[in-house]
Image: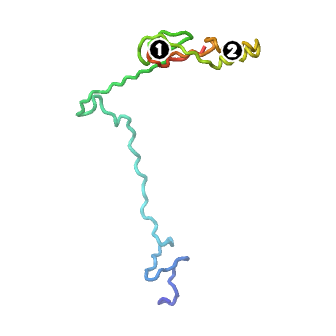
Amino acid sequence: MDSKGQPYPAHAPGFIPVPNQPPPQQHPTGYPHPPPQQSYAHPPPPPPYDANANMLPPGGGAGHHHPQATYVHTIVTAPQVGPDPASITCPSCQKHIVTRLDYETSTKTHIFAGLLCLFICWPCFWIPYVIDSCKNANHYCPNCGAYIGTYRG
């Protein structure tokens, strides 16, 4: 018992005192911790974005005497090729050549063979597989072997 005749000092409900420690200070809110005394303002907004802030002025900037870099963009487009060998400049080796053709069966070849089987006569189904005009024509450079393009007729 304490000196006032109470078995324990008056504390908040659920509080268990620890021996040899002073009781917590009571505040108007009833909690052992004081309410915050300071309110914090929002930080200032960042400075506006300047797209040219990280750019060097023409000539490389102060004290720099490096030659200005020049970039050349080369766009290579596939040349228009037809069903016959084409006379062109090869985009790979830059030589003037006449393309070499390799014929390849395509969906069109299979459709023609199927139509022959269904409507004309089935023994003729093989004809589209031996006629080059029913196939794709792949053009290659005879000098360096580079692929030039495909004609799908």
Tell me if 119 is positioned left or right of 8 in this view. Answer: right
Residue at image position (42%, 62%) is: 38
Q: Nearer the viewer, residue 84 or 124?
A: 124
> How far apart are labels 2 and 1 at the CA level?
30 Å
Tell me if 88 is positioned left or right of 64 in this view. Answer: right
| Residue type (three-letter) at the residue carrying disc 1 | Pro
Task: Give the structural element (helix, strand or loop) at label 2.
Answer: loop
Reply above or below: 7 against 130.
below
Residue at image position (51%, 81%) is: 10
- Coordinates of residue 14 in the picture (x, y in percent): 55, 76
Q: Nearer the viewer, residue 131 or 58?
A: 131
- Coordinates of residue 60 in the picture (x, y in percent): 28, 31
- Coordinates of residue 110 in the picture (x, y in percent): 67, 19
Reply above or below: 3 against 138.
below
**Within 10 angstroms of label 1, few (less than 14), some, or many (20 or more) residues?**
some
Q: Check the image and name the residue furthest to the front.
A: 123
Residue at image position (52%, 79%) is: 16
Q: Nearer the viewer, residue 93 or 24?
A: 93
Q: Check the image and name the residue furthest to the left.
A: 63
Q: Which residue is mark 2?
A: 126
- Coordinates of residue 145 in the picture (x, y in percent): 47, 18
Instruction: Tell me which numbered mark, 2 or 1, is placed earlier along the sequence.
Output: 2
